[in-house]
């Protein structure tokens, strides 16, 4: 499928693959050029067994973010080892060498964002340090938190991100929230828990846990949590490097 319309995508409907430079890992590419016609970002869900994960590598021209849905892992970068538990995001700037492994007995489930899309293109990855490649910032691990409404987590002002922006969303009991149209960026709404109603370009969407709603450039969304319910998730925005800053 290849379109530029608002679309709900579910990981369970898609085939899994084994990513390069990983062990014990199974990925499902949810948002990408092949599923929704995305050109500015890629979103996938990975499942990783204990003691496995990503070997040391860097993406010279991509920003990467990862959210721990289930399980616990260790992120290694810049000579530091940080524990990444459920509810935590990590931000990896372009050019930063890093690795990751799951430490919990329970397999880790990770939501991964690449901006621009990675697509397993070998040209976008190096596995040995290169003097010509330097990190465009520091690797950061951040907790999503419990604040209501929309809370900025990853962006230019919080971590110095250039092409990606992520907000935590928490709504309850009939509360509403608007996602403004972005002519320069594609947006993806990921519902982690609860129920959410979305209206996009006069279309109505009902989101269940694990659903991804893709919003192409220029599409705005009105979000509402049904009365008596709660909803939590994330709004992910990505733009091409040639676009104006977020």
Image (cartoon, rainbow, N blue to C red):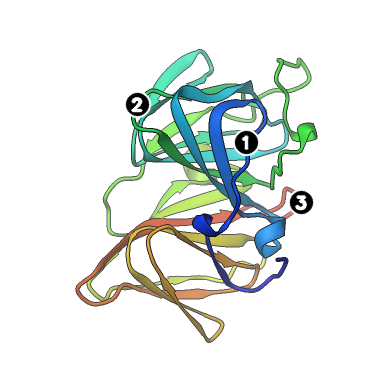
Q: For the residue labelled by badge 2, is the local secondary structure a helix, a strand or a loop?
A: loop
Mark 3 vs mark 1: in front: 1
Quadrant of the snapshot with the N terminus: bottom right
Disc 3 versus disc 2: nearer the observer: 2
Quarter holding residue 35: bottom right
- How far is disc 3 from disc 1 in space, using C-alphas? 30 Å
Residue 209's disc number: none
Residue 202 x/y as whole percent: 53, 86
Q: Spatial distance from mark 3 to mark 2, Cα to Cα?
A: 40 Å
Q: Earlier in the sequence, mark 3 or mark 2?
A: 2
Residue 58 position by quadrant: top right
The earlier-in-sequence mark between 2 and 1 is 1
Residue plotted at (59% across, 29% down): 137
The reply to whether dot 3 and dot 1 touch (C-beta < 8 Å) is no
Residue at the spot x=72%, y=36% of the render? Answer: 61
Percent of width and height locating residue 224: 35, 75
Tell me: 125 left or right of 91: right
**Label 3 with label 2: CB-CB less than 8 Å:** no
Q: Is residue 156 above or below residue 107?
A: below
Which residue is nearer to you in this view: 22 or 7?
22
For the question of whether residue 170 can be seen, the reply is no
Distance from disc 2 to disc 1, alpha carbons, whole Å, reads 20 Å
Q: How many marks?
A: 3
> Where residue 104 is drawn, which disc sits there?
2
Q: Secondary structure at mark 3?
A: loop
Residue on which disc 3 sits: 242
Please give the residue where the numbered disc 1 appears in the rendered image: 18
In the image, is 107 to the left or to the right of 126? left
Other residues around mark 3 within 10 Å, as few (<14) / some (14–19) / many (≥20): few
Residue 143, image x and y in percent?
Answer: 35, 39
* Residue 90 can be seen in this image: yes
C-beta proximity under 8 Å, tags 2 and 1: no
């Amino acid at each position: 499928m290849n379109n530029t319309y608002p679309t709900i995508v579910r990981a369970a409907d898609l085939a899994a693959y084994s990513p390069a430079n990983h062990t014990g890992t199974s990925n499902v590419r949810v948002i990408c050029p092949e599923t929704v016609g995305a050109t500015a970002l890629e979103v996938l869900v990975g499942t990783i067994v204990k003691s496995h994960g990503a070997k040391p590598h860097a993406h010279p021209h991509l920003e990467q973010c990862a959210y721990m849905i289930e399980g616990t892992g260790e992120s290694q970068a810049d000579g530091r080892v940080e524990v990444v538990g459920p509810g935590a995001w990590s931000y990896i700037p372009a050019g930063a060498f890093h690795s990751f492994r799951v430490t919990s007995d329970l397999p880790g489930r990770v939501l991964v964002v690449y901006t621009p899309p990675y697509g397993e293109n070998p040209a976008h990855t190096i596995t040995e340090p290169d003097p010509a490649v330097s990190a465009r910032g520091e690797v950061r691990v951040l907790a999503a938190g419990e604040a209501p409404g929309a809370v900025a987590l990853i962006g230019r002002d919080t971590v110095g991100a250039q092409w990606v922006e992520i907000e935590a969303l928490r709504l309850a009991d009939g509360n509403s929230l608007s996602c403004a149209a972005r002519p320069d960026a594609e947006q993806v709404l990921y519902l982690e828990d609860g129920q959410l109603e979305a209206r996009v370009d006069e279309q109505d969407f009902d989101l269940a846990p694990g659903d991804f709603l893709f919003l192409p450039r220029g599409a705005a969304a009105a979000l509402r949590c049904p009365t008596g319910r709660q909803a939590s998730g994330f709004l992910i925005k990505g733009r091409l490097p040639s676009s104006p800053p977020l």
